[in-house]
Structures are given as structure tokens and as C-alpha cells.
Amino acid sequence: MLKIKNLHASVEDKEILRGINLEVKAGEVHAIMGPNGSGKSTLASVIAGKDEFEVTEGSIELYGEDLEDISPEERAHMGVFLSFQYPVEIPGVSVTNFMKTAINESRKAKGLEDMPAKEMLKLIREKSELLEIDRKFLSRSLNEGFSGGEKKRNEIFQMAMLEPKVAILDETDSGLDIDALRIVANGVNKLKSKDNAVILITHYQRLLEYIVPDFVHVLHNGKIVKSGGKELALELEEKGYDWLKQEATV
Ligand SMILES: Nc1ncnc2c1ncn2[C@@H]1O[C@H](COP(=O)(O)OP(=O)(O)O)[C@@H](O)[C@H]1O
Ligand SMILES: [Mg+2]
């Protein structure tokens, strides 16, 4: 479903991604690992279409459609989900109301009417039960005073409600505690299906103890320097990244 070919991207004339090739099929979970500064978050942002990055070469296709001229909003409507896309605190707007607005905006973009209130309630109930999110949480103000775990819960809830085709979770936060890890892992494991794909970005092997990826890719200096199965994550845990850096410079 997602095909990235020879992708080069720059920010402020500095080349960050230097020829990424990656194909993600429906039903797959891909983990992207790599040291700090290797370009993981940049890759996520470029897929989502954030405009501070400039694609200088190569292409990203979703369902065979080139995303080059497609705005971040349209990409989202096509089913690209990036966690932390809405990190703002909005006092007075509840988790639920924010979600209702997001869903109806997405429907509007597709030429659909607002989701009937009853249907919306049913969807919210279904998804919050699946993820074991309690009602009190749903009425909290968005991100206001959220703990790390609660932020994750909110993100996973957004993902569940929007039912993306390609979910990109960028686990940048070094403060991911066990509670937050479990929330993310549990959510991904419950939401993955044969029709969607997950790209999980992390430099922690730990997360992959809970979410078993089909493929692991190591990014270094803007390139994928190694790809493998889940065993590659264990190898990285054991050996670190240095052996790959050496291979990468050859
Ligand atoms: N908005 C930006 N402006 C300038 N440099 C950036 C920006 N975003 C990322 N970079 C640079 O790009 C490189 C890769 O960053 P990033 O993609 O965040 O790496 P990772 O997520 O793997 O830690 C780093 O050298 C970083 O300083
Ligand atoms: Mg990052």
C-alpha cells in the first residue's frame, strides 16, 4: 500500500533523508530503529507531508498514487495517521469532542454529512471499550495536564477512531514508562488488521517486546542500512548500532 522509492528530503537545505526505499503492505508492522538524529522522525514527517521538509528526489506512493502534491490534511483523509499530530492542549475541549470534530471534518472532506450522533456514540463506546479507556478520561480536556501514559492513551484512541490505513507511531519520548509502553503496545496489537499497516518508530528495543514487528529497519544517516525480521531488534539490543555504522560507511 505504501511505496517509498529513493526518497531524499532536506530541511533548510540540509539533506536529512538520503535515499530511502521501503515498501509497506497491508497487514504488516514495520519497526524503524536507529540512533538519535538518524532521520526517523523526519521520515515520519515527510510521509505525513509536513511542509518544513522538502522532498528533493524520489517518491512516496499510497495505493499507487504519488503523494507529492497532496497536502498533509488530504493525506490524513487518505488514511495516513501520524501520532503527535495534535499535541496541543485545548482547555475546555474534551477528548471526545475533539475526536467528533476530527471525524466530521474528515467526512466533510470526503463529501459526507456529519456522522449521526447515535452512530458516533456507538463508535466511541466500541473503541473505548476495546482499548479499556474509561469514561472519565473521555471527558477530560485535551492534553491538559496529561501524564505520559494519558497522552499515549489519547493518541491510541485517536488512531482507533480514525481507523487509518497507515499508522505511523513515533515513539520519540525517552520518558516512555512501562505504563505508556503497554498502552501503545496494547492499542497497536488490538487495532492492527489485515487491511492496515503500522510503522513503529523507536530507538528502544523494549517496545518490540510487546509489539512483534514483521520487519525491522535500521536507519542511519538518512539511509536504511539494514533490514530484517524481528530478530534484528534483538541483535541491535545486544550489539548496539556501532557495527552498522561501520557497514554503512563502506
Ligand atoms: N526542523 C528541522 N530543522 C533543522 N534540522 C532538523 C529539523 N528536523 C530535523 N532536523 C535534523 O535532522 C536530523 C535528523 O533528525 P530526526 O529526524 O529528528 O532524527 P531521529 O528522529 O532519528 O532522532 C538531525 O540532525 C536533526 O537535527
Ligand atoms: Mg525522532
Image (cartoon, rainbow, N blue to C red):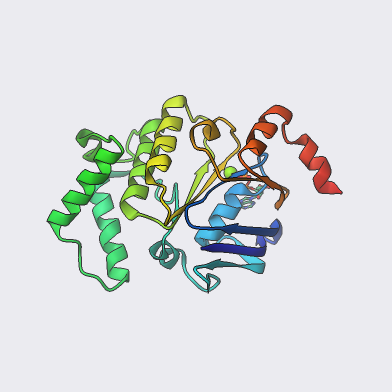
Q: Position of residue 120 (x, y in %)?
A: 19, 54
Horizontal side of residue 129 vs 234, given as left or right = left
Image vertical order of residue 243 relative to residue 7, above or below: above
Q: Residue extending furthest right?
A: 250
Q: Nearer the viewer, residue 57 or 194?
A: 194
| Visible residue check, residue 92 | no
Q: Residue extending furthest front?
A: 194
Q: Quadrant of residue 19?
A: bottom right
Q: Residue extending furthest top?
A: 178
What residue is rendered at 59% in x and 33% in y? Answer: 204
What residue is rendered at 27% in x and 69% in y? Answer: 108
Q: Position of residue 44 (x, y in %)?
A: 55, 53
| Visible residue check, residue 107 | yes
Q: Position of residue 230 (x, y in %)?
A: 61, 39
Q: Quadrant of residue 201?
A: top right
Q: Tally the marks.
A: 0
What residue is rendered at 24% in x and 39% in y? Answer: 129
What residue is rendered at 64% in x and 36% in y? Answer: 231
Q: Nearer the viewer, residue 167 or 210?
A: 210
Q: Position of residue 240 (x, y in %)?
A: 72, 32
